[in-house]
Image (cartoon, rainbow, N blue to C red):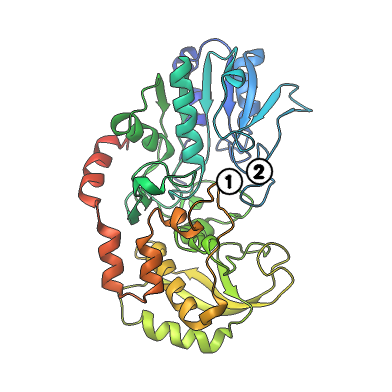
Amino acid sequence: MHKVKSGLDILSENVSWQKKISGKIGYLCHSASVDSKLYFGVDRLKDLFGERLIKLFGPQHGFVTDLQDNMIETKDFIHPYYKIPVYSLYSATRIPTPEMLKDIDTLIIDLQDVGCRIYTYIHTMTLTLEACQKLGKKVFILDRINPIGGEIIEGNILKPEFRSFVGRYPIPVRHAMTIGEIANYCQKFHGIDCELEIIPLDGWRRNMLEPTKHLSWVNPSPNLPTHSGCLVFPGTVLLEGCNLSEGRGTTRPLEVIGHPNIEPHSFAKKVNTVLEKIDLNGFMLRPTVFHPMFQKHAEKSCGGFHIHVTDPLTFRPWRLGQMLLHLFKEELGSDFKWKNDGYEYQFDKLAIDFINGDDQLRKWVEESGSYQELLKLESQGYLEFESNRREALLY
């Protein structure tokens, strides 16, 4: 079997990297911060550095990755086993405070991202880099795979007026970079200038779209228990901006989507008639009924689809997600609603506009725009981004 090693694996094996990590250490991680043998990163760092590891930090969903939803905060606590403080970067603050970083000489960041701008871990990472820059703290990033590959770029580029915790920099929804490459990109082009070293992956290839053939998948958040969920996430995460269920509260979150007022079989015929006329493939929509146990439409049966990826190389989840928003809205009429009660600590615009990083895509859905218009909205700004991205790539 082809062997892929994470930055954590490389640090564990390479004495020269270990010698670079000086002084007292903080570690930003979560339950997916494991090595190729599924050994927890905190234990690995304790083995390597002993009592020099003095503080732990957790992102959204918590240090132990147990909290389900957005804007559900975690508290700081003393870990009952490791006997050191765990600070939440998803509570009263999303940014490490000077008090949190006090007494730390080196901060190690080790987070499994899913390759989508709307997933918050890359933003926790950049906020942490900015905080460390101000205080002169050195940062090491233990790089990890992009589970949806390093070649396919998809989705519109964020506009600055829609910056939020689900989009801080002008990158596409599917950026095709590792978390280390995102850090490198922001250092080169967006003003972050902390003392940073990236411990790279070994054996990862940019065209790897099925990494579970080489690595065990550990869900980085509660609602991504499968790798196939990551592949569809850039499309189904859009549903967080409306009253369609994205499958939270089921056993296949972010893979099943629907609404209580949808009859799936008749709707499937309508949807497939539309999708067959445009260049979208690599998937099948299986009509289904599901019953969320919590979150949207809890304890109600929803009709909709299970999105099955048949060819990751040709599948374009963001484009499919936008088309499905348009088709569900057309089918549901007044029963379709945009979410307007706040999203990721932003309350001045609709959630869908923060998720999209633009309001033009919502207007495209509302006005039943054409597929060609969608592709035009998607492509704006790509030439500059792709040029900059090439300079930031590490692999």
Label annotation for residue 21: none
- In the rendering, at what x and y percent does residue 251 appear? 66, 64
- The answer to whether residue 335 of the structure is visible from this angle is yes
Which of the two residues, 363 or 290, is positioned nearer the viewer here? 363
Question: Considering the numbered disc 1 on the image, is that residue within a helix, a strand or a loop?
Answer: loop
Question: Considering the numbered disc 2 on the image, is that residue within a helix, a strand or a loop?
Answer: loop
- In the rendering, at what x and y percent does residue 43 appear? 66, 27
Which of the two residues, 307 or 15, is positioned nearer the viewer here? 307
Q: Is residue 178 above or below residue 367?
A: above
Q: Residues within 10 Å of mark 2 (few under 14, many from 20)?
A: some
- In the rendering, at what x and y percent does residue 341 appear? 59, 57
Indicate the amino acid at tag 1: Pro
Label 2 close to label 1 by CB (< 8 Å):
yes
Query: Residue reaching furthest front?
Result: 348
**Counting residues from the N terminus, which is met first, the one under dot 2 or under dot 1?**
2
User: Which residue corresponds to mark 1?
Assistant: 220
Per the model, the C-alpha gap separating discs 2 and 1 is: 7 Å
In terms of image quadrants, where is residue 95? top right
In terms of image quadrants, where is residue 152? bottom left
Q: Is residue 95 above or below residue 259?
A: above
Indicate the amino acid at tag 2: Thr
In percent of the image, x 46 and y 88: which residue is there?
269
Query: Residue reaching furthest right?
Result: 80
Q: Is residue 174 above or below residue 134?
A: below
Q: Residues within 10 Å of mark 1 (few under 14, many from 20)?
A: many
User: Which residue corresponds to mark 2?
Assistant: 65
Which of the two residues, 231 or 368, is positioned nearer the viewer here? 368
- In the rendering, at what x and y percent does residue 221 appear? 60, 48
Quarter of the image with the C terminus in it: top left
